[in-house]
Amino acid sequence: MVHSRPGVRLQRSEGRKTEESLSVIRTDMQVRKKNNSGRYGAWKRHLQIFIQVLILFFAALALLFRFVIGVAKVSGDSMDPTLQNGQTVWFSRLAEKYQPGDIVCFRLPDGELLVKRVIAGGGDVVDLTDEGVAVNGTLLDEHAYAHGDTKAEEGEVLYPYTVPEGSYFVMGDNREHSVDSRSFKAIVGAAVKGKLFGV
């Protein structure tokens, strides 16, 4: 007769339980690691998408300001009362030609950025009379925007003045406090950065 050894069976049973517990712990740790890895991967993908969207947004914004719209600040009171000193203005870069009455932003050869109103375009004849500004023999009605007397600057421009083709004769609305085409003659079209909107 073979007698069983209770102590040996007990040890083997406890060993199996320990191995099972360790196996459960290892499995649980693996599941947690996998879940954490999945969460990290999803978070990383979301972050990458966010960064890509952000890059595209700023690239589109840069292109918008480079080719479509621009911003400038009015310096001085030459466009008063239409525009005030220090006022921020927006302009469109899309226009290819400008009409009398348009307010434009342009750059002088010395780099200074100015905002003035277009009075006449290429081929037009501008004359300053006692009654006001005449273009091609017709007196302009400027009561809606012009302020002060429109006087010629002595020795700068001879009137009647024919605006060169592709150029614009511009003046500030505050005629007695504006340095404009009466001083530096007509501006070339290439110097015009754009037409103001919202004014």
Image: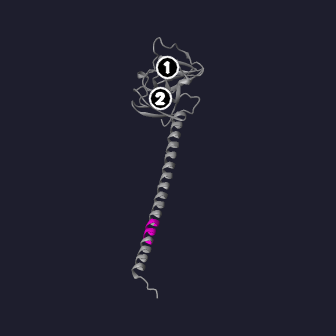
Check whether the beta carbons of the residues at disc 2 and disc 1 lie within 8 A of each other: no
Q: Which residues are magenta?
A: 20-27
Q: Is residue 17 magenta?
A: no
Q: Residue furthest front?
A: 1
Residue 152 x %, y %? 47, 16
Main SS class of the magenta portion in the image: helix
Dot 2, how many residues are within 10 Å of its Cα: few (below 14), some (14-19), or many (20+)?
A: few
Up the image or down, 89 lies above or below 167; here it is below
Q: Residue at x 47, y 55 (%)?
A: 40
What residue occupies the far bottom of the structure in this picture?
1
Q: Position of residue 118 (x, y in %)?
A: 52, 26
Q: Residue at x 44, y 74 (%)?
A: 16
Q: Secondary structure at mark 2?
A: loop
Task: State the mark number for residue 124.
Answer: none
Q: Secondary structure at mark 1?
A: loop
Give the residue number, with chain letter if any, for mark 1: 109
Q: Which is nearer the eye, 160 or 189?
A: 189
> Measuring 45% from the left and 23% from the top, which residue is drawn there?
112
Which is more N-terminal, label 1 or label 2? 1
Q: Nearer the viewer, residue 24 or 86?
A: 24
Q: Which residue is disc 2 drawn over?
A: 143
Out of 58 and 6, give the one closest to the viewer: 6
Asked if residue 143 lies left or right of residue 162, the reply is left
Residue 29 spot, x, y in % from top left: 44, 63
User: For the residues marked 2 and 1, what is the alpha-carbon distance in whole angstroms?
Assistant: 31 Å
Amino acid carrying mark 2 in the image: His
